[in-house]
Structures are given as structure tokens and as C-alpha cells.
Image (cartoon, rainbow, N blue to C red):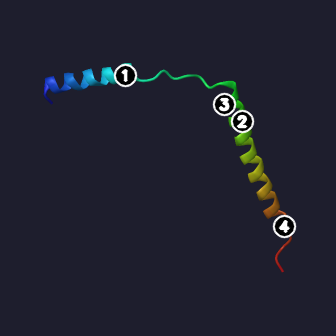
Amino acid sequence: MNLSLLLSVQAAATDVAKEAPKIQPMQPLGWAFLLVSVSFVVILTGWCFYKVLTAPPAQ
């Protein structure tokens, strides 16, 4: 590999890393929404399994 090519790739990668946005921590409202939505899906899935597994046998 050519040394000048390697240096230009490294310089480009450094420029991209400098322009990358800072990662923000999740806000409390985001955590609340996440917990409520995941809980809803888990409870709904459990309820569906319960209904299917406790259904009377087919005639």
C-alpha cells in the first residue's frame, strides 16, 4: 500500500471523527417510554400465550 494513500486515509478518518456528534445520555422521559413500551409488549405476549395454552381442546 502506498504511504501517501495511507496518510490521506488516516487524515480523512481523523476529520470524520472530529465532526461526529456527541452522544447524549437518554433523558428520563425516554427511559419511561422505553420501559412502558417493552413492558406492554411482554405482558401482551404473555397474555396471548396464556389464552392459547389454556383454550379448551378443539372438538
User: Which circle, 3 or 4, is nearer the viewer?
Assistant: 3
Of the numbered discs 3 and 4, the one sitting upstream in the chain is 3
Query: For numbered disc 1, what is the local secondary structure?
Result: helix
The amino acid type of the residue labelled 2 equals Leu
The amino acid type of the residue labelled 4 equals Ala
Asked if labels 3 and 1 touch by Cβ distance under 8 angstroms, the answer is no
Determine the residue positioned at 74% across, 42% down.
39
Of the numbered discs 3 and 2, the one sitting upstream in the chain is 3
Which residue is labeled 1 in the image? 17
Asked if labels 2 and 3 touch by Cβ distance under 8 angstroms, the answer is no
Query: For numbered disc 2, what is the local secondary structure?
Result: helix
Give the alpha-carbon distance from disc 2 to disc 4, as whole Å. 30 Å
Q: Which mark is residue 35?
A: 2
Horizontal and vertical percent position of residue 26: 62, 26
Of the numbered discs 2 and 4, the one sitting upstream in the chain is 2
Query: For numbered disc 3, what is the local secondary structure?
Result: helix
Mark 2: few/some/many CA within 10 Å (<14, 14-19, 20+): few
Which residue is labeled 3 in the image? 30
Q: Who is closer to the viewer here, 55 or 27?
A: 27
Quadrant position of the N terminus in the picture: top left
